[in-house]
Amino acid sequence: MPEFLETTVDKFTFKVATDRHYSGEGVWAQADGARVRIGLSDFLQQRSGDVAFAEVRPEGTALAFGDEAAVIETIKVNISLTSPVAGKVVEVNPVMATAPEAINKDSYGEGWLAVIEAANWEADRARLLDPQAYFELMKGRAEEEVRQ
Amino acid sequence: MNNETMNNERRKVAIVPCSGIGKTYGTVSREAAYDVTEDLRPEATQLVALSLLVLGDEAARAAVADCPAVTIDGCKLACATKMVRESGGTVAQDFAVLDVYRRHKQFKPQGIAELNEGGQKLAHALAEEVVAVVDNLTPDPSPERRGEKEGGHDA
């Protein structure tokens, strides 16, 4: 079980898992050697709303850093999610095809999107945010949205 | 006809949709409820406004307390389902618009005051699913529900 940084803004509580890195848009990346699992942060899934459909790029797809890795359709919006790592998609979470609400229920666990065989994880990791940095960014955005 | 059947005939299924204003899925839930109660099964159903249950309206509470209810929720808060139960009612079946949409991906709902074509079709698909439940809850269907034309059945 990961540990979390946590903040409550207005009536919403947001968690940031401390065992992975994040892109600024809120896609997390967790490396196990060169295999990097990706998914949505808790803030991103809560802000986006209930997921209706998730279409993840299929296995074998070559992705550059920042390429579209998945498209999520929620009750509010359609979101294009960019890859926080360059490499090849080697595994897609089968749950996304049958029960994409897993993203809302467990965004850091069962709701992962895909595993990417990284071409150069060390270089990509340097472009991502560590948990504390993402936590501060996310908290600022959440507070800004409440003010609006 | 026994007493049980007579009682069942008098019971109208309460249809309780989401009251969310300004939300597309809430509008889909209400359009589906209108479809069922006004067009598809007016003789077997009654529309109960969720807002009346929230306000504790006695007639609305009695409607769900005396009859089985079918709830249609617009989001995972499931206010319609929760309020029927809190009002002493029995939820025979609860529907969530999002679940129905997942079964009918081609009907993407948009709009709030007025649904787009996809939203209207989704509402109708949802209404048909509600009707299937209503038909199971209400015995002795009318000739129309049995697929017979009026006057077309000789004794």
Image: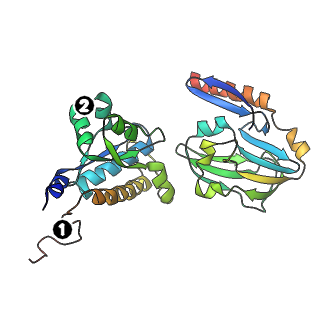
Q: How many angstroms separate mark 1 from mark 2 (CA)?
A: 35 Å
* N-term mark: 1 or 2: 2
Chain designation of label 2: B
Judging from the image, mark 1 belongs to the subunit labelled B
Name the residue rendered at 39%, 41% in the picture: B81
Q: Is residue B25 left or right of residue B43?
A: right
In the image: residue A146, left or right of residue A123: left
Q: Residue tagged by mark 1?
A: B143
Q: Residue at x 55, y 43 (%)?
A: A50
Q: Amino acid at mark 2?
A: Asp
Q: Are marks 1 and 2 on the same chain?
A: yes
Whether residue B11 sits left or right of residue A60 in the image: it is left
Whole-percent x, y for residue B53 in the image: 30, 34
* A131 to A57, vertically: above or below: above
Q: How many residues crowd mark 2 within 10 Å: few (<14), some (14–19), many (20+)?
A: some
Q: On residue A6, which mark appears? A: none
* Residue type (three-letter) at the residue carrying disc 1: Pro
Q: Is the C terminus of chain A in the top left, top right, bottom left or bottom right quadrant?
A: top right
Secondary structure category for the residue under label 1? loop
What colouring does the structure picture have?
rainbow
Tell me which residue sits at (33%, 31%) in the image.
Answer: B54
Q: Residue at x 41, y 37 (%)?
A: B79
- Vertical relation: B82 (above or below) B41: above
Side of A110 relative to B30 (left or right): right
Image coordinates for residue A59, horizontal then vertical, percent: 75, 61
Which residue bears the numbered disc 2? B57
Check the image and name the residue furthest to the bottom.
B154
Q: Secondary structure at mark 2?
A: loop
Residue B39 position within the rendered picture, expressed as x and y whole percent measured from the top left: 25, 56
Residue B66 can be seen, yes or no: yes
Figure quadrant of the N terminus of chain A: top right
Give the quadrant of residue B61.
top left
